[in-house]
Amino acid sequence: DGGITQSPKYLFRKEGQNVTLSCEQNLNHDAMYWYRQDPGQGLRLIYYSQIVNDFQKGDIAEGYSVSREKKESFPLTVTSAQKNPTAFYLCASRAGINTGELFFGEGSRLTVL
Amino acid sequence: KNQVEQSPQSLIILEGKNCTLQCNYTVSPFSNLRWYKQDTGRGPVSLTIMTFSENTKSNGRYTATLDADTKQSSLHITASQLSDSASYICVVTEGGNNDMRFGAGTRLTVKP
């Protein structure tokens, strides 16, 4: 079945550690996105990518990094510079940057101990 | 200030009852508005999309309305079921740059 796969579902991190969240899609979509979801707030855009080897900062990119070496993959690294990383992270994709429905993965919940 | 405001923040209803969720936005220019359903701990799933010229659209027991003049949308759920318990998120796409603006969501709980 076509869709977006995020892993891991749950992740615990000690302060000072970097962690990488995986996002893979087999929808042949060009555009991919990373959002952060906190209680009582709307989704906030971290990074997005319109095409392979290109990505742009979103509204809250500080402390995060991404790569887009393959069309199917858009991993997110939460670095130790992110001061409040505990959150639910959602990866999404759509056919193009200006078109179509956003399809979301199941999310990854990161907890910093 | 968030450009997409949803109300109420949370809502509890009994199974079988109807309810209406509201979404007010200031995003301009307007391209489209989507309602998503998000089950706890899962990713959001699209329910409906409304464009400027559409006033109402149904998807089963879900009916969305749009008043582009007053910049308001509603999602009406008929004959609620326990499986309707979820957060409902309103997303407005800005015309031109196609930026998507997310509401904070309404948390709906349907009780037996």
Image (tube, rainbow, N blue to C red):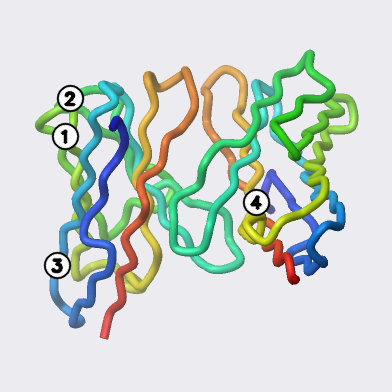
Q: Looking at the picture, which amino acid does disc 3 mark?
A: Asn
* Separation of residues labelled 1 and 4 (CA atoms): 30 Å
Q: Residue at label 4?
A: B88
Q: In this rendering, would B11 be left or right of A20?
A: right
Q: Looking at the picture, which amino acid does disc 2 mark?
A: Val
* Separation of residues labelled 1 and 2 (CA atoms): 5 Å
Q: Earlier in the sequence, mark 1 or mark 3?
A: 3
**Quarter-wise, where is residue A78 in the image?**
bottom left
**Residue A18, numbered label:** 3
Work out whether disc 3 and disc 2 sit on a shared chain.
yes
* Crowd tier of the residue under label 1, counting other residues whose Cα lies within 10 Å: few below 14, some 14–19, many 20 or above: some
> Residue B49's spot in the image, x, y percent?
65, 27
Q: Residue furthest top?
A: B53
* Separation of residues labelled 1 and 3 (CA atoms): 18 Å
**Residue B25, numbered label:** none
**Residue A52, numbered label:** 2
Q: Residue furthest right?
A: B70
> Residue A92's spot in the image, x, y percent?
37, 39
**Residue A68, numbered label:** 1
* Separation of residues labelled 3 and 2 (CA atoms): 24 Å
